[in-house]
Structure formats: structure tokens, C-alpha cells
Amino acid sequence: MLIGLTGRNASGKSTIVAWFSEKGLRTVSCSDSIRAWLAKQDIEQTRDALIEGGRELRRQGGPGILAELLLKSLDGEDAVIDSIRTPGEVEALRQRSDFTLIEVVSNMEARWQRSQKRARAGDPLDRVTFERQEKAEEIAKDDAGQALNATAELADIVLNNSGSIEELNNNLDELFIILNMT
């Protein structure tokens, strides 16, 4: 089983990754390859550096490079992949017949509140910046950029995470049963 997650900032992807991890799936992120590249370049791993690092790796290796690198490291293992942000990554992951892409959706207010509560390094401190960053990630200017809208269109399943953690966990329990049956 290979599960991929896409979605907007603070939609709950990390919470879902942790849930799948508790079910025994290995957890990886398309950002892992970027972080390794940044470390080799001795660049601080800020949100902006991760975005630009991803663009640079895609320029060098093509639009699916981050996913291709993950597939090699997984070697057929069951896993959940966080931070899928381009159609090229989806295309690369579809090499595995057991791949399912889940788009995690949540309303803007819930995501803004989560972003403020988690206070991750690089998260915007004001809502205007939060919304501006999101807009910049929607449509890629070229094959190297993030394209959340186009990636979301490729989702096999849309999971709404605008409610409580209990609702999310119930939805994930149901989803896990379905995924194990296919």
C-alpha cells in the first residue's frame, strides 16, 4: 500500500501521516529529498528554501524527481508520502499499482487557526502572508514549480478535514478498511 497526500498548508496532512504511521506504514515526504539537498548545500531549511530547493531539483531532474527518489528508497514498502505538490510526482508514484492519492481539504479559517497553533518555523505570522503563500503554490509557472490545483485534480480520494480530530480519525478508520480491500 502506497498512500500519497496532497493539500494546502495546514490542512492536516501531518496529522494523517502520523495516523498511518500508527497503522504500521513507513512515513516519508517529498520534502525529504529537498532537505537532504539543502543540507549538502549548507542552506538553512526554511519554507522558502524548501520551495526553491524543490524547484531546483525539478529543474535538474524533471518534474517527478522527488517522487522518483522516494520510490527508490522505499523499495516496495508500504508507506504514506506527505507533501506531493506536482502532477509529475503523482505520475512517478503511479508506477506502483498500489498507489492512492488523497487530497486533504480544509476550509481557510481552520487551516489558518491550525497554522497559528502549531507555530512551525517558516509559518506566516499574519493571515495576508498565509493567503499569499497559498496563492503562489496553486499554479506552477513552469514544470519546476508547485502546482497544488493540478495535483489535487489527480486525487483518487478527497478527504475533508474541516471538523474535529475525532471526525478525522473516524473517516481515516473507514478509509483504511476500504484501502485494505482494494
Image (cartoon, rainbow, N blue to C red):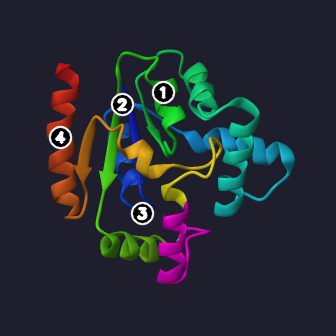
Q: Which residue type does callout 2 highlight? A: Gly
At 31% from the left and 72% from the top, the residue drawn is 110
Amino acid at pointer 1:
Glu
Residue 69 or residue 76, whichever sits in front:
69
Query: To which residue does mark 4 refer?
Result: 173
Q: Which numbered disc covers residue 10?
A: 3
Q: Amino acid at mark 3?
A: Ala
Q: Secondary structure at mark 3?
A: loop
Q: Secondary structure at mark 1?
A: helix
User: Mark on residue 24?
Assistant: 2
Can you give x and y, in whole percent of width and height, for residue 166 in the image?
17, 58
| Contact flag, marks 2 and 1 (Cβ < 8 Å) | no
Mark 2 and mark 4 residues within 8 Å of each other at the beta carbon:
no
* Closer mark to the observer between disc 2 and disc 1: 1
How many tags in the picture?
Answer: 4
Instruction: Please give the range of residues in magenta.
Output: 120-136
Q: Nearer the viewer, mark 1 or mark 3?
A: 1
